[in-house]
Image (tube, helix red, strand yellow):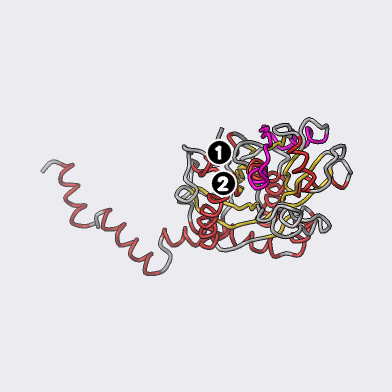
C-alpha cells in the first residue's frame, strides 16, 4: 500500500475524524451552556459598542433634529463609554439621510435619529421613496415630542392668529412662509394652516433650518412654523414674535402663548416627535441595550429638565410599542396630509 494511503488509513482507524471531533465539541459546549452562539448572544450587549457609532441626522445642523440628536448622542456616549458621532445627511426633506440608514449594515453601528416627517409624513408626499418606514427599520425607542410655534418678524403688524389670517386675505399669495423642505414639519404646518383658514400662503423651501430663521429675522419671509427648541433663543432675544403654538395644548416653555386652535382656528393640531431607529436585522441584544440605556436617560430628572427648557417633552417606550406607534402615526399623518392639501412639488 502506498505510504500516503496507508497513513490515511491508519488515521481513520486510530483518530476521530475532524468533523466528528468538532460535532462532539459543539454538543458538549451546548450542553454546558457555553456554546459559541450562546456566548456571543450573552456577550454582545456588554461588549457593544466596541467602536464609534455613526448616528445619522437626516437634516442640516442647527435644526430641531440636530439639536435634540446631539443632546441624546452626548448622553449615550457618557453612559455607554463610547463615541456616538453625529453625521448630518440633509436632502430631499430628510429622506436622503433616512435612506442611508435603511441601506446600512445591520450591526448596531449605524443609527437614525428619526423624525415624524421622514417616517410618518414623507410616505404620503413622495410617490417613490428609497425606504419603507416599517419594513426597513428596527424600532429602538421614541425620544421626545415637540411643539412648533407660529412666528412673525416683530415689524409685522399681525400679533394674533386672526390678524395673520386677515393680513393674508388682504395680500393673497404674498405672505411667504419658510421650511426646511417639502414634507418637513414647517411645510405641513403652513399648508394645514392655509387650508383650514382658507388663505393662500406661499411656501419657500430652504436647505437648512438656519436659513429659515435668518430670513424671517431679516424680513425676507413673513411666517415661520418653527419647532419651539430652535425658536426659543430668538423669542427670548426679541428677534421674533410668537403668535401661537401648533399643538393641542400650550407649551410648558411658552405658557402665555395660546394654541392656534384656541386663538381662532378650531381643529388645528400638529405635533412633532423624534425617535431612534436601526436598520432592520440589527441584533436584538443591541436594540435592547440601546433601549434600556435611553429609558434611563429619558427618566432622569436632568434630561426632563433639559428637554422642557428646549420646548420638548420626553417620550420613551419599548421597541414593540414604538413600532406600533409608528404604524398609527402613518395613518394619522396620512389624514393630516390629505386635509392640508400638501404634496410633493
- The answer, for residue 233, to whether it is visible in the render is no
Relative to the observer, which residue lies in front, 28 or 57? 57
In the rendered image, which quarter is residue 27 located in? bottom left
Q: Position of residue 220 (x, y in %)?
A: 78, 30
- Taking the spot 24% from the left edge, 56% from the top edge, the residue there is 15
Identify the secondary structure beneath mark 2.
Answer: helix
In the rendered image, which quarter is residue 205 located in? top right
Relative placement, left or right, of 4 versus 227 is left
Identify the secondary structure beneath mark 1.
Answer: loop
Q: CA distance from mark 2 to mark 1?
A: 8 Å
Looking at the rendered structure, which numbered label has been put on residue 337?
A: 2
Residue that mark 1 sits on: 343
What is the span of residues highlighted in magenta in the rendered image? 192-217
- Taking the spot 79% from the left edge, 35% from the top edge, the residue there is 216
- Taking the spot 18% from the left edge, 42% from the top edge, the residue there is 4
Marker count (numbered): 2
The quadrant in which the N terminus is found is top left
Relative to the observer, which residue lies in front, 332 or 54? 332
Q: Position of residue 118 (x, y in %)?
A: 57, 44
Residue farthest to the left, as pictured: 1
Q: Position of residue 256 (x, y in %)?
A: 84, 57
Residue farthest to the right, as pictured: 238
Relative placement, left or right, of 11 versus 104 is left
Q: Are marks 2 and 1 in contact (CB under 8 Å)?
A: yes
Magenta span contains residue 202: yes
Amino acid at each position: 500500500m502506498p505510504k500516503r494511503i496507508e497513513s490515511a488509513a491508519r488515521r481513520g482507524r486510530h483518530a476521530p475524524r475532524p468533523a466528528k471531533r468538532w460535532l462532539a465539541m459543539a454538543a458538549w459546549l451546548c450542553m454546558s451552556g457555553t456554546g459559541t452562539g450562546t456566548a456571543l448572544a450573552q456577550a454582545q450587549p456588554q461588549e457593544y459598542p466596541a467602536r464609534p457609532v455613526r448616528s445619522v441626522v437626516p437634516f442640516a445642523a442647527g435644526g430641531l433634529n440636530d439639536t435634540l440628536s446631539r443632546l441624546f448622542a452626548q448622553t449615550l456616549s457618557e453612559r455607554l463609554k463610547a463615541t456616538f458621532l453625529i453625521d448630518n445627511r440633509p436632502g430631499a426633506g430628510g429622506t436622503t439621510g433616512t435612506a442611508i440608514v435603511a441601506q446600512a449594515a445591520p450591526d448596531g453601528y449605524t443609527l437614525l435619529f428619526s423624525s415624524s416627517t421622514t417616517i410618518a409624513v414623507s410616505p404620503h408626499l413622495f410617490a417613490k421613496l428609497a425606504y419603507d418606514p416599517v419594513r426597513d427599520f428596527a424600532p429602538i425607542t421614541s425620544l421626545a415630542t415637540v411643539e412648533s410655534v407660529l412666528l412673525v418678524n416683530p415689524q409685522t403688524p399681525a400679533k394674533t392668529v386672526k390678524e395673520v389670517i386677515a393680513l393674508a386675505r388682504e395680500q393673497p399669495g404674498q405672505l411667504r412662509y419658510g421650511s426646511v423642505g417639502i414634507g418637513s414639519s414647517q411645510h405641513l404646518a403652513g399648508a394645514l394652516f392655509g387650508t383650514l383658514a382658507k388663505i393662500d400662503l406661499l411656501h419657500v423651501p430652504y436647505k437648512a433650518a438656519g436659513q429659515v430663521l435668518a430670513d424671517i429675522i431679516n424680513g425676507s419671509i413673513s411666517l415661520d412654523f418653527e419647532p419651539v427648541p430652535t425658536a426659543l433663543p430668538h423669542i427670548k432675544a426679541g428677534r421674533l414674535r410668537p403668535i401661537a403654538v401648533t399643538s393641542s395644548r400650550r407649551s410648558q416653555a411658552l405658557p402665555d402663548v395660546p394654541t392656534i386652535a384656541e386663538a381662532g382656528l378650531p381643529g388645528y393640531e400638529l405635533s412633532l416627535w423624534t425617535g431612534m431607529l436601526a436598520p432592520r436585522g440589527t441584533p436584538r441584544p443591541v436594540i435592547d441595550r440601546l433601549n434600556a440605556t435611553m429609558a434611563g436617560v429619558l427618566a432622569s430628572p436632568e434630561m426632563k429638565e433639559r428637554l422642557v427648557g428646549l420646548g420638548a417633552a420626553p417620550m420613551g417606550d419599548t421597541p414593540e410599542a414604538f413600532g406600533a406607534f409608528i404604524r398609527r402615526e402613518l395613518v394619522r399623518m396620512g389624514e393630516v396630509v390629505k386635509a392640508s392639501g400638501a404634496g410633493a412639488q
